[in-house]
Image: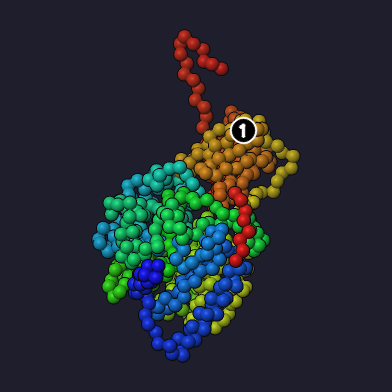
Amino acid sequence: MVKRFLILTVALVLQYASVIHAAEPDSATRATDAILAKLKIDLESVQNRACIPGMSVAVIHKGKLIFAEGYGKRNQKDPFTPETRSILGSVTKAFTATAIGELVAEGKMDWDTTPVNTYLPEFKTHDPILTSQLTIQDLLSHRTNMPDVDDVWFWGNETRLELIKRMRHAEVKPKMPAVVNYNNAMYAVAGEAAARVAGVPFEKLVRDKIFRPLGLSQTGFSMAEMSENSNFAVPFSADSYEDAKAGRFTELPLDNAIQKVAAAGDIFSSALDLARWGHAIMKGGVLNGKQVLSKEGIEATLSAHTIYSPAERDPDFALSAQYGMGWVLNSYKGHNLYEHGGRSVGYTTNLALFPNDELVVAILTNAPCTALPRVTSLHIADELLRLPKSHDWLNVNATADTELCFALEEEMNKGTFPERVANKPPAHDPIDYAGEYDNPGFGTATVRLEGGKLHITFGAFLGSLTPYHFDSFTTVFQHPGVRIGQLVTFSTGPDGKVCGATFAVMSDEARYFEKKQAKPEPVVAQYYPSSHKQTVMKG
């Protein structure tokens, strides 16, 4: 047993040797040790009141792994540790952009000259001119005006390529965005284009170009692969802010639907591996004195391409944050800050790099609605960089911003509807609304009548339709960990029959779905045609 422990210890030291160096116990080191000791206590305190079941934090400063701690639970009973694997959500995007940067360095692709359609002919938009112009850089910097089709991609029944082919039917918005127009599907298209060029599946491309060269042994793709190791975080949700504060969380099933947009959010990792990845990016792709990743490729991902937000009203940040490719480019109290958050059903993540200060902060949680990861990164920067305190990130912002997150979630859960017109019942019998409704860009919704009540299914979403006014019905589309309030409005054709339905799901615009009409039977000459369990999480 002792021998096995020693072997494991040596292996871990060697794995992270590139970022661990000896340090003399001088006054500065002692001061840092005191800060880290207090940080451990502070995070233990905030974890118990920050609406999360568990989290892990890893910090690299000046090439040294100086902090690696886990807090709370990764499941109903086991502790969340620095080695615990967790889904990264949109933190995945930087991995995708960097892997494509390797193909650019090899001369197999380019960022902003060749149309994506050249690499992946199946990708076409509603506008052929736009199809001929969109480049990899456009897709990765979120500067397209393509509609949000996340709901179809996450929970549809089709393959990636089938979904990509659908995009030619999704009408583009009439005006190019002035700021980042987040679109996970565009990352999926870019990833599939890179895979086509490399001649391997997208996941293998990233493993070969990123994971293996950097020694990211605790990193991979999909919840299914993540759960092959026992030390993984299960996803949790809470119905309200009050439930989360009280530790009443519901464990969610592992859902592999996000594999459809693997390039945008399907990577899992540990805090240790994520910090190691951040350090490699901060060092321009150098590991153990060797150029492992393309320096030019990394610099391209860290160059501003799109306005991320018009202005940060807080003077501690840049007047206008920018978006590179997979990274938000900002500054914090005069210190350059590259970061990206990630949120998936049951998980929230943040990775922050302070390149001029050689500081990396990686934070994982198994909670879907918490501000703790980002504000903890800023708190750690304040402490380690000895910055003037202008916010109480852990005691004030973590609570206030998390409560706001739940408020926005509740608004989405309920939906926003026009003022109801009283005493205006539906114009048709319930059975007249039943049928299949199709949108070539977004898929098929099915309305059925069961037990005298109308129900709707769209992909993996289920809902019951309740009359609102006229031919409009309210519903809540539900999937484990997701609830979206909707107004579904049916249309009537010139013949007086129901011919379509309009609703939005996750997109910012309502979409029209045409009802599939039953085909009449053919006329033959000699015949006439016939008429989940809640659990209280503590500590």
Image quarter (top left, top right, bottom left or bottom right) of the C terminus: bottom right
At x 54% / y 59%, what residue is drawn? Answer: 75
Disc 1 target residue: 449
Tell me residue 477's x, y (percent): 58, 46
For residue 12, side relative to residue 448 (left or right)? left
The answer to whether residue 389 of the structure is visible from this angle is: yes
For the residue pair 268 and 489, the one nearer the viewer reads as: 268
Tell me residue 167's x, y (percent): 42, 46
* Residue sitting farthest toward the right: 423
Q: Is residue 168 above or below residue 537?
A: above
Tell me residue 441's x, y (percent): 46, 43
Question: Callout 1, which amino acid?
Answer: Leu
Image quarter (top left, top right, bottom left or bottom right) of the N terminus: bottom left
* Residue sitting farthest toward the left: 107
At x 62% / y 44%, what residue is drawn? Answer: 475
Q: Is residue 485 above or below residue 290?
A: above
Colouring rule applied to residues: rainbow
At x 65% / y 35%, what residue is drawn? Answer: 453
Q: Is residue 192 above or below residue 1?
A: above
Q: Secondary structure at mark 1?
A: strand
- Determine which quarter of the picture holds residue 100: bottom left
The answer to whether residue 176 of the structure is visible from this angle is: no
Tell me residue 473's x, y (percent): 64, 41
